Image (cartoon, helix red, strand yellow):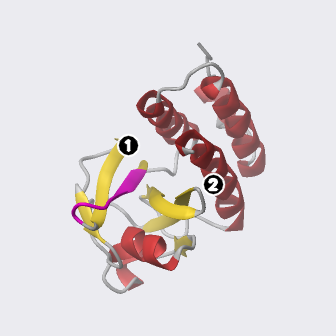
């Protein structure tokens, strides 16, 4: 079991924090192959490492209903299903690209699962080069996410994709 010092990690710069988190993810995944346990620990690690993270979790494609369904998450109650192409998650999934939203109120068709959400980043997750879901992170502050978040969360999603393969 890996022990994480969440108090001290918050004293690091954003880049240092992400770098530390990625190393901790590697340690968490070592020797554990249960996908639910791994995905759950990763979102807990993220939520507790970044004070501006209001909500963090996954949505995965449900081919039977042709929408995204909620996966492991940390935060308040969430929307259980999201239509493909709707909201930030559905748009990121259908466009197969990371979306950074500085102000969710200005994103056309934004889905308000939590009215405290002010900004958001959504990163698509791939399995065998096919988008199978998204990593969704919301913040209670405007313009919380930038290129640093995008780079490191995309690197994290690459690790998550290997779990699914």
Q: Does the magenta-highlighted stretch encompass residue 44?
A: no
The magenta span reads 58-65
In the picture, which quadrant includes the C terminus?
Answer: top right
Is residue 11 visible in the rendered structure shown here? no
State the SS at label 2. helix
State the SS at label 1. strand
Question: Image point 64% across, 33% down: which residue?
Answer: 25
Task: Say if mark 2 contacts mark 1, CB within 8 Å.
Answer: no
How many residues crowd mark 2 within 10 Å: few (<14), some (14–19), many (20+)?
many
Q: Mostly what secondary structure, the magenta segment?
A: strand
Lateral position of residue 34 relative to residue 157, left or right: left
Of residue 23 and residue 12, the one placed in the foreground of this image is 23
In the picture, which quadrant includes the N terminus?
Answer: top right
- Residue designated by label 1: 73
Of residue 150 and residue 116, the one placed in the foreground of this image is 150
Question: Image point 69% across, 31% down: which residue?
Answer: 26
Please tell me the numbered disc located at residue 59: none
Picture coordinates of residue 123, whole percent (x, y): 54, 62
Of residue 117 and residue 56, the one placed in the foreground of this image is 56
- Residue designated by label 2: 153
How many residues crowd mark 1 within 10 Å: few (<14), some (14–19), many (20+)?
many
Lateral position of residue 39 relative to residue 3, left or right: left
Looking at the rendering, which quadrant does residue 69 occupy? bottom left
């Amino acid at each position: 079991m890996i022990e994480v010092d969440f108090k001290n990690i918050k004293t690091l710069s954003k880049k240092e924090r992400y770098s530390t988190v990625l190393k901790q993810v590697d340690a968490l995944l070592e020797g554990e192959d249960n996908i639910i346990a791994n995905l759950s620990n990763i979102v807990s690690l993220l939520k507790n490492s970044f004070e501006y993270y209001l909500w963090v979790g996954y949505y995965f494609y449900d081919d039977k209903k042709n929408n995204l369904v909620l996966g492991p998450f940390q935060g308040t109650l969430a929307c259980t299903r999201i239509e493909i192409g709707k909201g930030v998650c559905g748009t990121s999934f259908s466009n197969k690209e990371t979306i950074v939203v500085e102000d969710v109120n200005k994103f056309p068709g934004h889905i308000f699962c939590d009215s405290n959400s002010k900004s958001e980043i959504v990163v698509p997750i791939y399995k065998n080069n096919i988008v199978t879901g998204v990593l969704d992170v919301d913040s209670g502050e405007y313009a919380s996410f930038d290129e640093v978040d995008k780079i490191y969360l995309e690197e994290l999603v690459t690790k998550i994709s290997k779990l699914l393969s």
